[in-house]
Amino acid sequence: MSTLDDAQTVTRKVDQPSPVAGAAAPVDPRRAALAIVALALGGFAIGTTEFVTMGLLPEIAHGIGASIPTTGHVITAYALGVVVGAPVIVALGARLPRRGLAVGLVLALGLGNAVTALAQGYDQLMVARFIAGIPHGAYFGVASLIAASLVPAERKGRAVSGVMLGLSVATVIGVPASTWLGQGLGWRSAYWLVLGITVVTAVGLLCFVPGTPGDPTATVRRELRALKRPQVLFAITAGMIGFGGIFAMYSYVAPLVTDVADLGRSAIPWFLLAFGIGSVLGAWLAGRLADWDVERSVVGGFVATAVVLLLVASLAGLPAALWVLVGVTGVLGSVLAINLQLRLMHAAGDAQMLGAALNHSALNVANGLGAWLGSVVIAAGHGYRAPSLVGAGLAVAGLVVFVLGLAQARRARV
């Protein structure tokens, strides 16, 4: 089978997933649209809380009396929460009614943000961000299945994309807005805002999402069996390492703007906005690239990421160039995330919820890895350009893992 055939197979499996036990019949289109908006709002809350920490890192560091590199570890704590929570909650919750599970997860996210806003000191903040990260991947897993169950087969792919769009829109609206709010009213206000969004989301889910049963045949062993598949492991590992390159730079975008580009703090939201606009454009581009070739899109995405991050390290002192490069990084982040998701969902087979959740676990390992390695080189005295160089190396390493996975798949077909 050719590479193009593989990509077309992946695309067909995402657009028309196999039936899932307990799935609801398609509902009225208007109600389905409102339900998907409610589900996407949960993604908006997740995207806002995940990325606003990066924009408010200097304020948070000052507020808890820690250095910026040390405070950067709270980004890693959130990522660890996602990594632990996604497979555990999905495996244990596959039998639960899906609407109830989604509502519980989004309220748990709100609780994690409330604990964050109340945290006093570094240790409490680390625990709070870990708690906030636990529902992240599992929410996207169950929300994707709910969205797919609400529409006819030919619209399932667009329904799932609608849920994921909330995450991209958060980088355009939620993160810059909450960053402005945090700079003006104190960093804690940004997390109180996310709590409010989660409450609105929960109400929307209860009002518009029909009751959907879980899968009575699901077992923990069956769900976790997907982790034994070589292509699942290759896709997860490539995402964990390679996507870390983007977070190595983006985790420290605030000091990059102020200390290297020599701009004021008020400029930081504009760079976050550039990343967000790039993410939305990248989501549009990713679908077209996936229709062309998923494998080549991932390979090209890793190569382009390495090049762009090298340019960031070289040109960060030029504000206009840095703004453009941060935006391009956002484009590449969406291209990689979505195409890795397509590859992983195909490789996971029948474990659809787990496959959808695992991609977010992998990307949040990347989040934590990139932020941690960035803090290491900054603390070692190499400056705020150094994380971008580390990021370029991570992108290359992810590319190597992904190519090795392609080689293994081709050997298995022979």
Image (cartoon, rainbow, N blue to C red):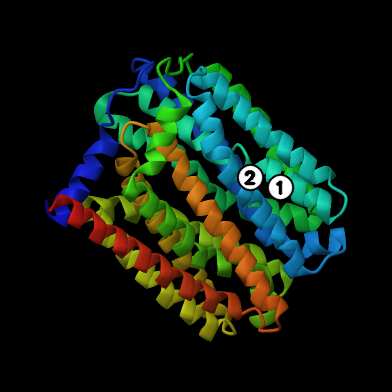
Quarter residue 63 falls in: bottom right
> Going by the image, does 139 lie left or right of 157?
right
> Going by the image, does 128 lie left or right of 156?
right
Number of residue marks: 2
* Mark 1, secondary structure of its residue: helix
CB-based contact (under 8 Å), mark 2 and mark 1: yes
Q: In the rendered structure, which amino acid carries the disc numbered 2?
A: Gly
- The residue located at (71%, 56%) in the rendering is 74
> Going by the image, does 208 lie left or right of 51?
left
Q: Pinpoint residue 334: horizontal percent, then vertical percent.
A: 42, 55
Residue 129: numbered disc: 1
Depicted 185 relative to depicted 206: above or below: below
> Going by the image, does 5 lie left or right of 130?
left
* Label 2, label 1: how far apart the Cα atoms are: 8 Å
Residue 81: numbered disc: 2
Question: Which marked residue is nearer to the observer: mark 2 or mark 1?
Answer: 2
Q: In the rendered structure, which amino acid carries the disc numbered 1?
A: Arg
